Amino acid sequence: MRIRNVLHKGLRRLIEDDDASGIQAAIAEKLRRMISFLQDMEAENELRTVQSWKAHRLTGDRQGTWSLFVTKNWRLTFRIDKDEIEIIDLDFEDYH
């Protein structure tokens, strides 16, 4: 899937320029693998194939947003535009 936009500045630099300076060094490679997977993905049901990412949809005011486990406190979150088959509002969030 194509990534339409990235909210987190450090994650955007990692994707666009392969510059990990805005990301914790210990997880940069994991994020690269995750982003690669998302870009190669053809359908959202593929998200659940990597069990260690604990892929799930959020509820409440964030209903429809996907969350993927990166570390104990950090998650990749995004929505999927099913009409355009794109990932939108990709973010790297501290949950705590």
Image (cartoon, rainbow, N blue to C red):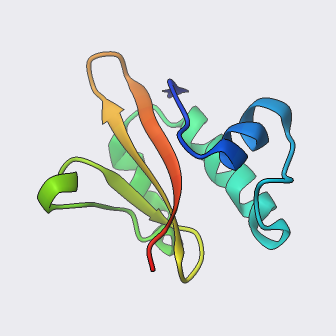
What residue sits 16% from the left and 55% below the top?
61
Residue 66 image point, x, y percent: 34, 53
- Residue 14 falls left or right of residue 39: right
Report the front residue among 17 and 49. Answer: 17
Kindly identify the residue that appears in the image at 55 percent across and 83 percent down: 72
- Image-quadrant location for residue 13: top right
In what quadrant of the picture does the C terminus appear?
bottom left
Q: How many marks?
A: 0
**Drawn side of residue 85 relative to residue 83, left or right:** right
Residue lying farthest to the top in this orientation: 84
Residue 75 placement (x, y as % from top left): 50, 65
Give x and y (percent) for residue 59.
Answer: 16, 61
**In this rendering, position of residue 92 left or right of residue 17:** left
Q: In this orientation, which residue lies closer to the viewer: 56 or 71? A: 71
Q: Position of residue 53 (x, y in %)?
A: 50, 68
Q: In the image, what residue occupies the spot 44% across and 33% down?
A: 87
Q: Give the image quarter of residue 25.
A: bottom right
Q: In this view, does 88 lie above or below 57?
A: above
Which residue is found at the position 21% from the left and 47% from the top? 64
Compared with 84, 10 (above or below) is: below
